[in-house]
Amino acid sequence: IFPTDEALLKMLYLATMDVLRKWTGRVQNWGQILLQLSVQFPERVQPYLR
């Protein structure tokens, strides 16, 4: 489908940029999600909390 690996990487990059540009909404129930993640994975979440 893609002539080279570089062509595939370029397509993935452009698709990612397009998704990030469109992603302007907020995550519903983020507080509850963060609480559950901190309980399940405290060593991974705590460094990113203020």
Image (cartoon, grey):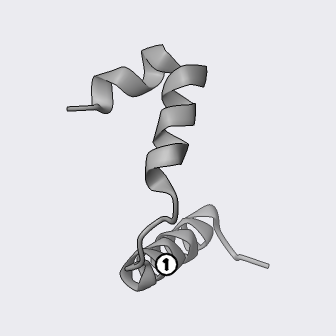
As drawn, the residue found furthest toward the top would be: 43
The answer to whether 50 appears left or right of 20 in the picture is left
Q: Amino acid at mark 1?
A: Val
Q: Quick check: 30 above or below 26?
A: above
Q: Identify which residue, 16 or 47, lies in the foreground.
A: 47
Q: Position of residue 19 (x, y in %)?
A: 49, 78
Q: Which residue is mark 1?
A: 19
Q: Identify which residue, 1 or 43, lies in the foreground.
A: 43
> How many marks on residues?
1
Looking at the rendered image, the quarter that the C terminus falls into is top left
Q: Quick check: 18 above or below 37?
A: below
The residue sitting at 55% across, 65% down in the picture is 9
Q: Position of residue 36 (x, y in %)?
A: 57, 34
The residue sitting at 54% across, 45% down in the picture is 33
Q: Quadrant of residue 45?
A: top left
As drawn, the residue found furthest toward the left would be: 50
Q: Quick check: 2 above or below 47?
A: below
Looking at the rendered image, the quarter that the N terminus falls into is bottom right
Crowding at mark 1 (Cα within 10 Å: few <14, some 14-19, many 20+): few
The answer to whether 9 appears left or right of 50 in the picture is right
The residue sitting at 48% across, 65% down in the picture is 27
Q: Identify which residue, 30 or 20, lies in the foreground.
A: 30
The residue sitting at 56% across, 77% down in the picture is 11
Q: Secondary structure at mark 1?
A: helix
As drawn, the residue found furthest toward the right would be: 1
Q: Quick check: 22 above or below 17?
A: below
Q: Position of residue 44 (x, y in %)?
A: 45, 22
